[in-house]
Image (cartoon, grey):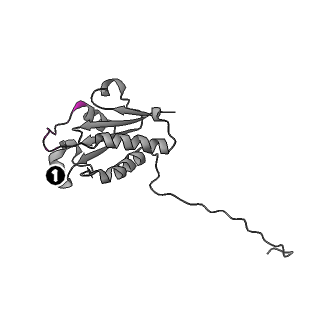
Amino acid sequence: MNKYQLISLGEPNGFKVQILKMFKERISELGIPLNLIEYIDSSNFETVYKSNLPTVVLYFGDLVAPTKPNEELNSTLADSALIIPIVSNLEEFSNQVPPGLRGINGFELSSSNRIEQLISCVLEGFNLLRHSRRIFISCKIRLKAAGRFG
């Protein structure tokens, strides 16, 4: 079975540790072995990242840090990876992310109350969580033979 890659780039805010902890909990709840998830950041990107594996990038934007793109971000953009720009305030989105991400919908994370929603977005990006569930109901119908069909 292929591995999934969860990449964190940008300037991690105070929620990064909580996000990873809750993500691992959800993965366990789904019965997915934790070793199927590869956690990548700038420190191990060059040696671990594979462009042919399912990838979700959490890009943490920041008002203070420079928003210039880097090699890791450029690689994932070129590989059409799912990128979720995370900002503290959507009204400041353009000031918190590099120009290459400004056309992508962002995710506002200003409190820990929204971490679960972010994790659901990541799981959906990996196709590990269905956005909507479908129900199929099967029933048997017995027909009494009337002697003739017609």
Question: Residue 27 sits in which quadrant?
Answer: top left
The quadrant of the rendering that contains the C terminus is bottom right
| Left or right: where 111 falls relative to 64 | right
Residue 4 in picture, x, y percent from top left = 42, 36
Q: Can you see residue 82?
A: no
In the rendered image, the residue lying farthest to the top is: 47
Q: Does the magenta portion include 69?
A: yes
Q: Position of residue 7 (x, y in %)?
A: 33, 36
Magenta stretch secondary structure, dominant: loop
Q: Is residue 133 magenta?
A: no
Residue picked out by circle 1: 92
What amino acid type should be assigned to the residue bearing mark 1?
Glu
User: How many marks are shown on the rendered structure?
Assistant: 1
Q: Of residues 80 and 91, which is closer to you in this image?
A: 91
Tell me if mark 1 has few (under 14), some (14-19) or many (20+) residues whose alpha carbon lies within 10 angstroms of its own. few
Q: Which residues are magenta?
A: 62-71
Residue pictured at 50% horizontal, 39% vertical: 32
113, above or below 7, in the image: below
